[in-house]
């Protein structure tokens, strides 16, 4: 009976505070206060207060055993060793120093060198230096500005051309970037 009275009183006080907050046009705060105010009565009506008391009693019993029982301390040490071993193996795996256990799949090729930090604003990005327009026109046939390609057009395509010329250009760009 006392639990019911305390729950109703706490809920009423919380609703009153929420009403004051709403009166001052602080609706977000009022909504939070109202939500918290509903908890005591909701816990009482669902019967969770006896469960909370049982949990509190069990925690108190565990705490007294913790101080006085060496078996509990042995369990705590074992849990600590287990957590330490798990953390160490995860750290070693991230460092890539796995000696024999799991093997990582081999990469397709060497990873391209990348800077450790992003370039500063206004600084040129790290990577291959772009070619001058004349060198690019000579190196890549079929581009605008390349002499002799304007006359070829579509009629200049041979029988062996299967329409994959664009993919060859993309492949070359990817190769130059080390991808």
Image (tube, rainbow, N blue to C red):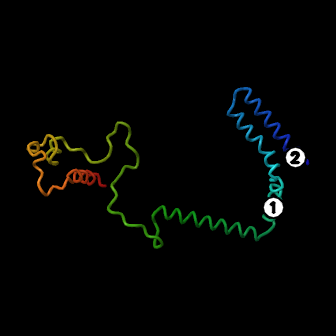
What residue lies at 71% left-to-right and 36% top-to-bottom? 31
Q: Quadrant of residue 18?
A: top right
Q: Is residue 99 above or below residue 34?
A: below
Q: Residues within 10 Å of mark 1 (few under 14, many from 20)?
A: few
Q: Position of residue 57 (x, y in %)?
A: 83, 59
What residue lies at 69% left-to-right and 67% top-to-bottom? 77
Give the side of residue 120 with respect to residue 176, left or right.
Answer: right
Q: Is residue 91 above or below residue 9?
A: below
The CA span between labels 2 and 1 is: 23 Å
Q: How many marks?
A: 2
> What residue would you read off at disc 1?
58
Mark 1 falls on what kind of element? helix
Q: Is residue 57 above or below residue 102?
A: above
Give the mark nearest the N terminus, 2 or 1: 2
Quadrant of the image for the C terminus? bottom left
What residue lies at 41% left-to-right and 46% top-to-bottom? 117
Q: Position of residue 99 (x, y in %)?
A: 46, 71
What residue lies at 81% left-to-right and 40% top-to-bottom? 11
Give the side of residue 75 with respect to residue 84, left or right.
Answer: right
Q: Quadrant of residue 122?
A: top left
Q: Quadrant of residue 60?
A: bottom right
> What residue would you read off at disc 2?
4
């Amino acid at each position: 009976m006392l639990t019911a009275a305390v729950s109703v009183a706490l809920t009423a006080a919380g609703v009153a505070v929420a009403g004051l907050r709403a009166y001052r046009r602080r609706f977000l705060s009022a909504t939070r206060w109202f939500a918290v105010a509903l908890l005591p009565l909701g816990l009482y009506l669902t019967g969770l207060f006896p469960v909370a008391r049982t949990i509190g009693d069990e925690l108190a019993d565990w705490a007294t055993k913790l101080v006085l029982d060496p078996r509990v301390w042995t369990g705590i040490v074992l849990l600590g060793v287990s957590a330490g071993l798990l953390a160490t193996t995860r750290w070693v795996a991230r460092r890539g120093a796995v000696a024999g256990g799991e093997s990582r799949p081999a990469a397709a090729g060497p990873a391209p060198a990348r800077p450790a930090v992003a370039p500063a604003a206004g600084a040129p990005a790290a990577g291959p230096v772009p070619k001058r327009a004349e060198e690019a026109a000579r190196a890549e046939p079929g581009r605008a500005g390349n002499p002799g390609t304007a006359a070829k057009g579509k009629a200049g395509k041979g029988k062996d051309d299967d329409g994959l010329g664009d993919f060859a250009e993309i492949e070359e760009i990817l190769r130059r970037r080390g991808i």
